[in-house]
Amino acid sequence: MSATGIGPGFTRLAWVVAVLPLVSAALTLFFGKRTPGRGWIYGVTAVGAGFVLSLLVLWHFVQGGGATSSSVSWFTIGPLHVEAGQFVDGLTAIMLIVVTGISLAVHVYSIGYMQGDVRFTWFYVVLSVFTAAMLDVVIADNLIQLLVGWEVMGLCSYLLIGHWWEERINSNAAIKAFITTRIGDVPFMFGIFVLIAATGFHSASIQQVGELVGGADVSRGLVSVAALLLFGGTIGKSAQFPLHVWLPDAMQGPTPVSALIHAATMVAAGVYLVGRLYSVFLHAAPEVLRFVGVIGGITMFGAALLALVQDDIKRVLAYSTVSQLAYMVTAMSVGPPGRDAAFFHLFTHAFFKALLFLGAGCLIHAVHSNNMSEMGGLWRRMPVTFWTFAFGSAALAGVPPLAGFWSKDELLVAASKGHAVVFTLMLVTALVTAFYTTRMVMQTFFGPYRGHGEPHEAPAVMTGPLVALAFGTITVGFLGAAVTGGVFFKWVFFEAPEPVTFVLWVVTLSILAAGLGILAGWYVYRDQPEPDPAFQLGWLSSLLVNKFYLDEVYMHGIVLPVRDRASAAVVWFDRNVIDGVVNGTARLTKDLALGTDVFDRTVVDGAVNGVAQTAGFTGGLLRYLQSGNVQRYAAFLFVGVLVLAIVITRV
Amino acid sequence: MIRLPLVLFFSAALFSTGVYGVLARRNAVLVLMSIELMLNAVNVNLVAFSQFWHDVTGQVFALFVIAVAAAEVGIGLAIVILIYRNRETINVDEVNLLKW
Amino acid sequence: MTGQEYAFAVLALVGTVSAIRLVTAKNVVHAALYLVVTLSVVGGVYLLLAAEFVGWVQILIYVGAIVILFLFGLMLTRAPIGREALDNQQRGIAFLIGLGVLGGLVFLIQGAFSWSGPRLRPSVGTTAELGQSLFRQWVLPFEAVSFLLLAALIGAVVLSRRDDRP
């Protein structure tokens, strides 16, 4: 796609959406503590305005034609000229709405959820900064700008996961998240460098890169390498196998954080990356996309299985997120229709996943526990939460006519065209997804209440966003459904809009899978069996409960050897060699100084003192001339006169 | 008559004796005496040359020398007496406040 | 050697010996007496050289007044009359210097006049001639000397005054 000039109306102002949260972050940081309400007003206003502006951007984009971009010059290194600017196409507009919308919901929800928190104001600061960073990623027209937003997001994620860092477990989770995503960020960065190199070090613009890789000037091998490296970033950020291990632990952070960052936005950035730079993946060797599909497939199915055995409701949702993201990644591997379908699923998933997380937050807030084994029978006491949660779960399971159904359907349709393995895997995973989702709902809302205390409905400031998101869950699906014309795909497409077709057999299979899963779930869990059947599957249970022993593998295979051996070696090197050199230099200098001092004292001072002593000595000798004895003076006088006399008269 | 060099030798002898006396004597009065000796030697010289040049100026100057010597002895002895009063001694060795 | 020369030789010998005794006497009064002898001898030499006024003035002033002054000085300063060493540490050097002075002078003299040299023929020296020269050519120095004597007189009186004002 080529960018025409500056677009009409509000599309020109897309960058404002990204800047507003930064302004509010600064305001919150400086004035938040003094503002009544401790500063949520700035963030909510900024993101709210951003949301409205995003709608306007979409509206004007739809009216105008084609993608637009505008930028200003940022910096130049040698031949490389990097700009900072915005690239606005349908995808950008959709992403803007998603990010600002979910962020707004979370900002409002947090007024209630984080009330009385020790670092309430700081929470909002980081939340706003994060929103700004994600928006930067979404509107970026060049790779460097994208990288900046990407990294800032990682930082904010770390800060927010570790928001209650007084507990060791929280700070550990934050570190795990940061380091794991970092492992993915390194190849990502190198991927960017490879792409910049492919442009001959001229530009980092995404468009130019996209055009270049399609041409004949760049070798396929180079493009494949770049694609693989970029995908490394996706594996890290979007928690794909093998770097998925940080996402479940990231649930230690406050639930609004989980909703925003680890469900709807940041983790989606990895998927967004693949989709944005799709031409790189398309023009790479076909093995690259196959690899992407393999990773996605493993993650998709494995995470779904892991979600079966979780007691912590947030962990169920976390694994579910990993699985759904993997759906998108797998779809990306199928081809351009899969890419578009993946973005549609990203769009819908943001809504219902955020809804589910926020609902879970209400539940946790009510029963003061994350564990589903301490919930139950809450459908009466928390009706708003129950109904919204139910809609969200249904969407996740793929129940029509909710959004999740339509997007999952599109994914299946894309896979159905020639990728049998992917299709089958997706279908099976959909069944498992429906099953664990039902399990979750049954255990949480039905049966006797197994906890302590008096759970009650959440305050309006928390249930309000739930309702809004539920509304979105119900409605947005129709944007991409075949029955309504699939207008979504007229906005978000790769090179050319694909017509959305209604494939009956796919739809049937999809409904069947969902139905079967729900039925099975209802059947197994309708009586609240104790203990949970999921834990009674023998070796399968222990395998799943221990997360395929992956954490142990990482710990003993990587972390401990690095910490104990590699780090120890580096420390040894640092202490003995480097410090040795430094200390040696210091010692040498000291000895030199000592030597100089000795030299100074003996030779130099000796010379100076020697001069003085000589003067004193000669003076001491000469003083005998001044004896006070007149006759001695007279003696000298006479001698002198005598000498003079002889000299004058005879010489 | 008398050969000039002989007179001059006599004057020289007196003078050098006076020099020895100035330098070697401890008693201040004796030093003054030696100075007188030297002055006399000078006078002898003056008179001898006055007769050599047939000019009476030499003798006139000898007179002046005698007068000055007298004045000098007067003052010198006054000072010696003062020193004696202050220090109970006129040993020149012991009058050495200007020593280093 | 004429008769005068003989006389002179004798006088010179006596004078030299007494001068030497003057500077080496252990008894201060003896030294003073030797001074008298030396001064008288010098007076005699003057007379031999036909400088009659100078000669008698020599006797008058030196022997008559100055020696008395010396003796008074010796008395007032309780000069030790006895056999104490009156020479100081410098004796050796002083002797050398004296010898050197003598040698130097002799050297100069003989360089100027050789050992025998011209003979003196005394012609001037009468009181009248002296007076003439003194009060004509040298009247100014004469007046100056009289001032000098006045100053010395006053000075000596002032210096030796006992400072015992109430």
Image (tube, rainbow, N blue to C red):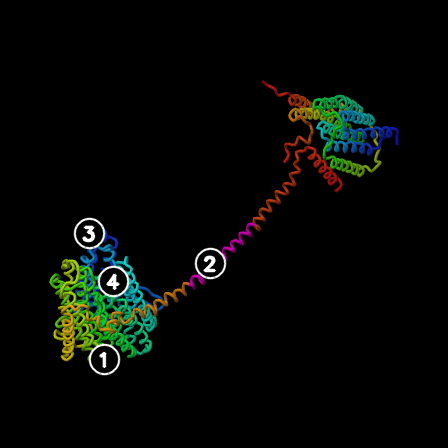
Q: Earlier in the sequence, mark 4 or mark 3?
A: 3
Image coordinates of residue A25 in percent, x first then y, are: 24, 57
Q: Earlier in the sequence, mark 1 or mark 4?
A: 4
Q: Which residue is mark 2?
A: A583
Highlighted magenta segment, given as a residue range: A572-601
Vertical side of A565 occupied by C83: above or below: above
Specify whether A336 is left or right of B11: left
Q: Which residue is mark 3?
A: A36
Image coordinates of residue C150 in percent, x first then y, are: 67, 22
Between A114 and C126, the residue placed more toward the observer is A114
The answer for which chain carries disc 3 is A
The answer for which chain carries disc 2 is A
Q: Earlier in the sequence, mark 2 or mark 3?
A: 3
Q: Amino acid at mark 2?
A: Asn
Taking the spot 73% from the left edge, 41% from the top edge, the residue there is A647
| Residue A122 circle label | none
Q: Quadrant of residue A3?
A: bottom left
Label 1 CA crowd tier, 10 Å (few <14, some 14–19, many 20+): few
Image coordinates of residue A634 in percent, x first then y, are: 70, 34
Q: Give the spatial CA distance, label 1 vs label 4.
A: 36 Å
Specify whether C41 is left or right of A439: right
**Are labels 1 and 2 on one chain?**
yes
Vertical side of A76 occupied by B62: above or below: above
Q: Quadrant of the C terminus of chain A?
A: top right
